[in-house]
Amino acid sequence: MLRFLTAGESHGPALVVTIEGLPAGLPVLVDDLAAELARRRLGYGRGPRMRFEADEVEFVGGVRHGRTLGSPVAVLIHNSEWKTGKWAQEMSAAPGATAAPLTQPRPGHADLAGMQKYGFDDARDVLERASARETAARVAAGAIAKRLLAHLDIAVLSHVVQLGTARVRDDLSRPGPGDLDQVDESEVRCFDPDAAAAMVTEIKEAAKAGDSLGGIIEVLAYGAPPGLGSHVHWDRRLDAAIAQALMSIQAMKAVEIGDGMAVASRRGSEAHDPIHWDDTRADYVRAGARAGGIEGGMSTGEVIVARAAMKPLATLNRPVLPTVDVVTKESTVSFKERTDVTAVPAAGVVGETMVALVLAAEVVRKFGGDSLDELCRNHRGYLEALRARS
């Protein structure tokens, strides 16, 4: 079983992620993780922190001479600000107290609910862990998952389909595995140049108003074989696992697989993907992607399509959201932390991460093997058996 666990706070000394269940012999380098973390910092509308958030990565276990050992892989992501001493006292693990507790919780953030749940009187005790900075640790884990999937010819990528009210054309073709560089070259990681220009305009307008913007990302997985996931238990269904993974990303409020909500308004004759036999491929194919490459909780062999909707960020550059001071109980406005106008382009990279981790967990469950060679051999055998039965 492949699983991961992250630890660390936004302004603490480091983030940590441990990944368990990787096969031995998987080639992985610090540079692989650093490249994915650099993609997470992409996007027009990001704040100044992205310019100095260098994400210095270090393997502290599970990798030797550039290959996994089959033991848990532990990754450390140093906080470049910590070295300056700026947060050393405020976030120290040693006994002490803050001189400036945050007592005006932000609507839309974890602040108040977390303070109530854990009995805190300072929102920083909540926000430091609730911060989307935690996703850097996930992206590091996802970079390794992508390396694993690549050995099985599975590629995961994302693009922004809506930012604010600006949206890609309905007739636009989806990007394929070879288009990722083109997507990343866009300021907003959008495959539609016209929509991208409109998105940048919306960001500029929101920035002038001191406001924030949400949007929708689409994650695509190419090359997944039929049969990942299962129909036999609720927690084995692939679409359920992907939905949970995407919803776990900070600020996400909705997920849909394939045509999602749109299918609900169609008749059955127009809601499903017809199955055909392709003599050239000697394989079954589905006409369309209404189901998003998943039927009955299992991958169909077609491209997996999942979208997630991100709400506008709860911290604004112009604090106007009404709240209550938890000490005085007086009406006030929420406090301001460093923030972005939008983080939707970066959220796409995190979405890739979560889908890649789900798929990596499923291929490890499906094909097994203690080493990469054994996993790949089992994968090839499964595909050969499918072809033999066709």
Image (cartoon, helix red, strand yellow):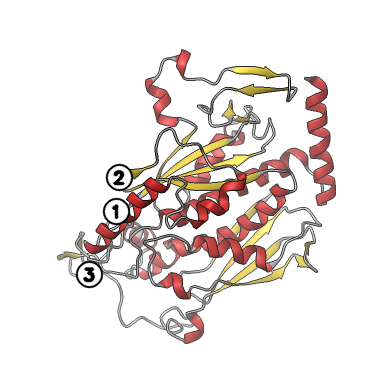
Tell me if residue 156 comes above or below residue 86 in the rendering: above
Query: What SS does tag 1 mark?
Result: helix
Q: Nearer the viewer, residue 50 or 168?
A: 168
Residue 202: mark in rendering? 1
Amino acid carrying mark 2 in the image: Thr
Outermost left residue: 330
Residue 381 at x, y = what percent?
Answer: 83, 34
**Disc 2 to disc 3, how far (Cα)?**
38 Å
Residues tagged 1 and 2 counted as in contact (Cβ below 8 A)? yes
Crowd class of label 1 (few under 14; some 14 to 19; many from 20; radius 10 Å): some
Tell me, for residue 327, which label it has, or none: 3
* Quarter location, residue 379: top right
291 versus 48 height, above or below: above
Measure how far apart labels 1 and 2 are at the Cα level.
8 Å
First along the sequence among labels 1 and 2 = 2
Front position among marks 2 and 3 = 2
